[in-house]
Amino acid sequence: MGILVALLILSFLIFFHELGHFLIARLMGVKVEVFSIGFGKKLICKPHKGTSYCLSAIPLGGYVQMKGQDDTDPTLKNYDKDSYLSKTPFQKILILLGGPFFNILLAFLIYLGIAITGWQKLAPQVGHIIKDSAAINVLKKDDIILKINNYKIKTWDDIKTAVDNSNPPLHLIIKRDNKLLSLTLTPKIMKTKDIFGENVKRKLIGISPSGKIITIHYPILESFNIAINETIDKSKLIFTGFMKMVTGVVGLNNVSGPVTIVKVTSDATHYGIVPVLLLMALISVNLGILNLLPIPALDGGHIIFNLYEMIVRKPLNEKVMIQLTLAGWAILGSLMILGFYNDIVRLFNGS
C-alpha cells in the first residue's frame, strides 16, 4: 500500500509540474499538443480541445509537448502564431519557469496548510545531557525550555536558532517540576558535522531532545511567514547540496534514483499524513530547483538559451544547440544510471 501511495505522490508532483508549463503556455497563446504523465509508449490518450492528455508506460517523469517544440529534434521548426517558437524569448522563459514555479508553489501550499492545521514538532524538552557540556550542571532531564534570551521557544528547532543567533551568556527560562526557573549558561564552541557531513564549529549547549512530539497551531499570518521560510530554506538546501556534489564535498554515492524516493515515501506513510506531506513538499521543491539547473535537456538549459537570445538579439547557432541538447541528455542519462546503481547498492546493503 505504501508503494502505491508513493507512486501516486510522484505522479501527482509530475502532473503539477507539467500543469505549470501547460497553463503558462496556454496563457501565452501556445498550443499544447500533448500533456503526458510518464514517458514511452502511450497507454491512454484522451483528446480535448486540441490537446491529447496521455498516460504513458514509464511513470518516472512526464512532459508537455508544445507546438513548435521538440527536444528530440531541435531542428524541427514551426512559426505559426500559436507555436512556441513564435513567442518572444521572455514569453518562452515564463513558460519554462511555469513548471518549477508550480513545484515550489505546491511546497509552499503544503507548508502553509500544515502550519495552519497543526505541525508536529519535537518538544523543547531536554532528553539527554552530554558529559562535560555547557548544560551538564545547569539543566536536568525533562526540563522544558521556554525562552533563551529574547527568543521564545515553542519547539526544539527554536533552540538551535536561539543559540546560533544569541551572544553568550544565554539566559534561559525553563519549566522544571511545574516551576519556572531562570538559569544562565555559556555555550561551548565545539566541532560537529553539518547535514552534508562537513566538519564545522558551532555554539553548543550539549543537550538532545526527549523525543516528545507536540502539535503547534500557528496563526494564519505567522503560517504564511513560516511557509515562505520553509520553502526558501529547503530550496537553498537542495541548491547547496548540488553545488557541494559538483565540487566533490558530497560524494556521488549520495545521488538517489526513483527506487530510493519511492522507498522513503513508502516508509513515511507508516508515520501518518503530516510526514508524508512534508516529504512531498521536499520532493516538490527538489523537482523545481533541479529543473532550473542549466542543463540543456532541462528547463534551466532552455532558459539559458533564451537569455542568450535576449542578450545577443539572435537565437543560438542551431548546430551548437543540437550538440548541447545531446550533451544535456547524456548528463541526465548518466545521472539516472548512477541513481539506479546507488539504489540497488542500498537495497543490497539493507540501507
Image (spheres, helix red, strand yellow):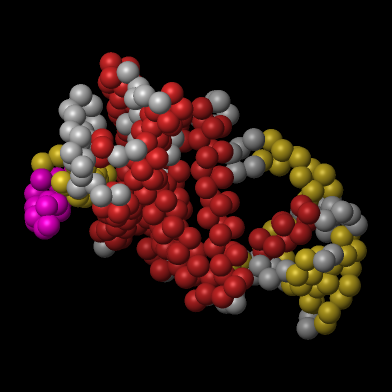
Q: Residues in magenta?
A: 42-60
Seen as rendered, the residue at the extreme bottom is: 178
* Residue name at image x 50 percent, y 35 percent: 242
**338 to 6, vertically: above or below:** above
Relative side of 45 to 222, left or right: left
- Image coordinates of residue 170 in percent, x first then y, are 87, 60
Give the quadrant of residue 82: top left
Q: How many marks?
A: 0
Q: Quadrant of the C terminus?
A: top left
Magenta stretch: residue 55 in it? yes
Relative side of 256 to 21, left or right: right
**117 to 251, vertically: above or below:** below
Q: Can residue 59 be seen at all in this image of the molecule? A: no
- Image coordinates of residue 184 in percent, x first then y, are 90, 64
Magenta stretch: residue 259 in it? no
Q: Can residue 328 be seen at all in this image of the molecule? A: yes
- Image coordinates of residue 36 in percent, x first then y, are 19, 48
Q: Quadrant of the N terminus?
A: bottom left
State the residue in front, 201 or 105.
105
* Residue name at image x 30 percent, y 25 percent: 325
**103 to 310, vertically: above or below:** below
* Residue name at image x 34 percent, y 25 percent: 315
Relative side of 350 to 203, left or right: left
- Image coordinates of residue 11 in percent, x first then y, are 27, 54
* Residue name at image x 66 percent, y 67 percent: 155
- The overriding secondary structure of the stretch rendered in magenta is strand
